[in-house]
Amino acid sequence: MIKKEDVLSGAWRTTDPKWQAWGLEYCTALDEGTRSSLIIWPEHCLVGTNGHAVVDDVNAACQAWAGSRACAVEYVLKGNNALTEHYSAMRADVERPDDLRTHFNTALFERLCKAERVVVCGQALSHCVAFTMRDLVERWPNNQLQKLVLLTDCASPVGGFDDAARTFVEEMTAAGVTVTTSEQLEWSGAGKSAGAAGTGASPAVVISPMPAERPGHHDLPEVLGPETEARAKKPRKTSPTR
């Protein structure tokens, strides 16, 4: 993890010097907030690779649902700005004033509020799922929190972050969110269109946090890179994941 002090000391610098001030501002905001500190992950979910695609079984289910109801599956992309992490499907960890895509997705939130229930699953339970749920719970009407459903058997934590995932699940349970499994959840009628259901109510919605669409980049703001020997005249520091 990269802290504000690591940027101030010069242990970590931005790859492009013009972003050094933002790198410090970014790490400071993360350290002062409730999110995770900056982490350099292995490259994953790159556009054009299998990691960015929807896995076969889930894709088949989505296409079957769309075909049977003459509806289209709507994918909400995140992580389009390499200058800020976007774990949550609702907003970036640190919003950029010059990019509304990093701000809280009010239009999506208002649509979700009209659903009978919002079923959340995906990867990872310790990060993307957790931050998505927390953003929803923070703004969701207190008397309707049971409409938010967390499927614990359809998500798992990043290795080494089991405690963070456990804390998140306990937090959601205490908040009044419906914490259950795919086997225990009553799916009857879920996902039917209002016309098919005959009640006029909105269909159930499933959010599975999608990987970032960031061509040729990591899934995290990689503007921070370790000092090279030429710059620092000291042994190069590298992330243990690289």
Image (cartoon, rainbow, N blue to C red):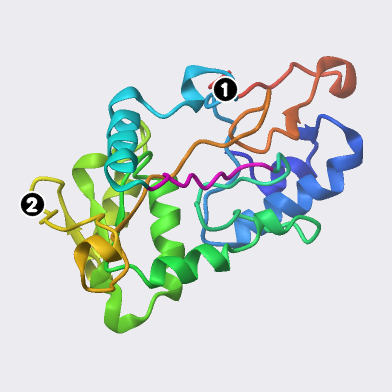
Q: Nearer the viewer, residue 187 or 193?
A: 193
Q: Nearer the viewer, residue 108 or 25?
A: 108
Q: Nearer the viewer, residue 215 or 218?
A: 215
Task: Give the answer, above or below, for where 220 lies relative to 172.
Answer: above
Q: Quadrant of residue 208?
A: top left
The residue labelled by disc 1 is 43
Q: Is residue 179 left or right of residue 42?
A: left
Task: Give the answer, above or below, for where 116 lies relative to 209.
Answer: below
Q: At x 57% / y 37%, what residue is drawn?
A: 212
Q: Which part of the image, by quadrant, shows the C terminus?
A: top right
The residue labelled by disc 2 is 184
Q: Which part of the image, by quadrant, shows the N terminus?
A: top right
Residue 167: give x, y in percent of width and height. Answer: 30, 55
Disc 2: CA contacts within 10 A as few (<14), some (14-19) or many (>=20): few
Mark 1 vs mark 2: give the one in front. Answer: 2
Which amino acid lies under the numbered mark 1 shown in the image of this protein? Glu
Which amino acid lies under the numbered mark 2 shown in the image of this protein? Gln
Q: Is residue 96 visible?
A: yes
Residue stretch rendered in magenta on the structure? 71-80
Q: Is residue 147 left or right of residue 19?
A: left
Q: Quadrant of residue 97?
A: bottom right
Task: Give the answer, above or below, for where 220 lies relative to 121.
Answer: above
Q: Main secondary structure of the magenta part?
A: loop
Instruction: Provide the secondary structure element on which disc 1 rests.
Output: loop
